[in-house]
Image (spheres, coloured by chain):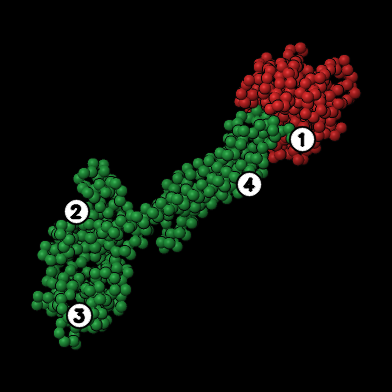
Chain colours: A green, B red
Amino acid sequence: MFWRMIFKTLARQKSKMLMIAFTVILGVSLSTAMMNVMLGVGDKVNRELKVYGANITVRHKDAALMSDLYGLTEGLGVNDKFLYEEDIFKLKTIFWGFNILDFVPMLDGHAILSVKGRAGIVGDVSIFGTWSEKHAILSTGEELSTGLKSLRTWWDVKGEWIGENENDAVMIGHLLATQNKIHVGDAITLSNNGVIKNYIVKGIYNDGGNADDKILMTLPAVQELMVLQGKISSIEVSALTTPDNDLARKAAQDPKSLSPDEYETWYCTAYVSAICHQIQEVIRDGVAKPVRQVAESEGTILNKTTLLMILITILSSIGSALAISNLITASVIERSQELGLLKALGAYNWQIALLVLLEVMITGLFGGILGYFLGIGFAQIIGQTVFGSYIEIARMVILIVAVILFFVTLLGSVPAIRYLMALKPTEVLHGK
Amino acid sequence: MSDKILELKNVSKIYGSLKALADINLSVNAGDWLSIMGPSGSGKTTMINIIGCMDTPSLGNVILDGVDISKENAANLTRIRRNKIGLIFQQFHLISYLTAVENVMVAQYYHSMPDEEEAMEALAKVGLQDRAHHLPAQLSGGEQQRVCIARALINSPQILLGDEPTGNLDEENEAIVVDIFRRLHDEGVTIIIVTHDPEVGDVAQRKIILEHGKIVNDIDQSATFGEALKLRN
């Protein structure tokens, strides 16, 4: 009888129940979309933030010490300390290897520049060798495609980037090029300690920073010019990271201060400090340090994005609860004679409250299921529009949405239930 | 049948400065058929609400089947009402989306267990077995009131309480309903009816006249009771 009454009521109040279901669909779809985006957005936002460059640099431990103690970025004790080129690919073997998206070696040096066809020399200039583009197949079988092109997406390049194996081509920073009237296609000569090499200027780049008065070359070209085969000064790493929390901050101070459980949690979470720690385990004499501005910006933006989505979810839930509350209260007031009659026939308050609640819950469940699938669709639209890729569906969202839906429906029903409790059969049954 | 089923002792109901009922004393024996009459505002509905356990008196005691219910809370009154009282309303108050038999079963559901067979028997008792699966909107006013009576009877209440049960009926349906009351009275059901209709009031065994919340007349119609019934027939 109970279920017969519920289903007949639902059928009879089709339009009102559809309005409630529609409200739930809107609320749940928004919550589902926001939560799926929120849970899947970490990597997406991080990937977007990769345009700001590397978030970790690896240097020789002595060079890092000189930098930390005296702020030195070149000179003795810095420029003469090198990492091994052969260690670079080990970066992809660490626990969080898959989170390392791009990495490039850097070899810094100086050379004497002269421009062909012009008398005299320009002078001593800074040069750096790296991978503009690098394609390799790792020992694990993974195909690697990285290079400075991926880490300097903001560069404005006139001409072209130098190719992977173009050891006789260079790119010149636009300040150096402007000051010395060097153009794309010009031939230049670089010499260092008796080694003299000729190069063609393939491109002029505008970095907007320190690199604008430098010359970019391939790594082998600089190694040859500097006679430093197999050596590199530093490695720039771009990794997907998780925003720091107290544990990460504690570990960043000293990983040995962690308890075994804390250490395991920290090590198995993609905190920038954990990734740095793991990089140091594979790069001989290397010290990995986060580029704080980038790493912290990523964390801040990610936290704020997450907060924004939580707020949207909360606001949409409150909105749904208010709308449901109005609709249920209106429905109950409209049915006050019927519900008063049930009281007169001997129904307890809780029995009538249960009847109304179940009607709303069934409608809510129906709306919730539709809203969930609609929300997944919204999440994919957001994923495609904002991040250009699909958002992975998190199963835990089903549980969270179910709990939110239950409480939103319950809270939305409170005014109606209060009205029901106070309803006196004598007030609604003797209308004449 | 002389056992007291209901006793009102010095019952008053006061709303602010208004005394809807003033010091009412009334005894009803099991199996009695009582009509309560009086002009609008005389306190008839207040009295039926108190007897029907839908309200409590401000002063005095209401003894129903030997139990004082005047100080009971709402939940206890609900329990007592569903076990002891059958309610009939002027406007029938059938649930519009349930069929006649389902309307009867609702009262069973809140009393104990719904039993369709038993509900059909109750409808047969009021001559509506053929209309059991019709919705209220498909029934005439008289038929709806008979469903209401079947619903009131389904849990075998000790008192059948009617608030203007013939108020919305034409003469023919009024006669049918009164005839059902007569048969129920013959079966020993205690009937208390509030009515404006002198003919319906006259049919009862005893007639109470209320004015300004007071019983101004308590007329024993036992002598003419049979005659009145015959008149109705």
- Residue at the disc numbered 2: A281
Evaluate whether label 4 is on the same chain as label 3: yes
Q: Earlier in the sequence, mark 1 or mark 3?
A: 3
Mark 1 residue type: Lys
- Residue at the disc numbered 1: A432
Q: Earlier in the sequence, mark 3 or mark 2?
A: 3
- Residue at the disc numbered 3: A199
B181 sits to left or right of A336: right
Query: Which is closer to the viewer, label 1 or label 2?
Result: 1
- Circle 2 packing at 10 Å, graded few (<14), some (14-19), many (20+), is some
Kind of element beneath mark 1: loop
Mark 3 residue type: Tyr
Percent x, y of residue A369? 52, 48
Which of the 4 image quadrants contains residue B15?
top right
Determine the chain carrying the residue at label 4: A
Percent x, y of residue B50? 70, 24
Distance between mark 1 and mark 2 Cα atoms: 88 Å
Q: Earlier in the sequence, mark 2 or mark 4?
A: 4
- Circle 3 packing at 10 Å, graded few (<14), some (14-19), many (20+), is many
Q: Nearer the viewer, residue A119 or B132?
A: A119
Distance between mark 1 and mark 3 Cα atoms: 104 Å
Q: Earlier in the sequence, mark 1 or mark 2?
A: 2
Residue A31 position (above or below residue B142): below
Question: Residue visible at 29% across and 52% down?
Answer: A270
Q: Nearer the viewer, residue B195 or A202?
A: B195
Residue located farthest toward the top when viewing the structure as drawn: B2
- The label shown at residue A16 is 4
Q: Nearer the viewer, residue A1 or A181?
A: A181
Q: Earlier in the sequence, mark 4 or mark 1?
A: 4
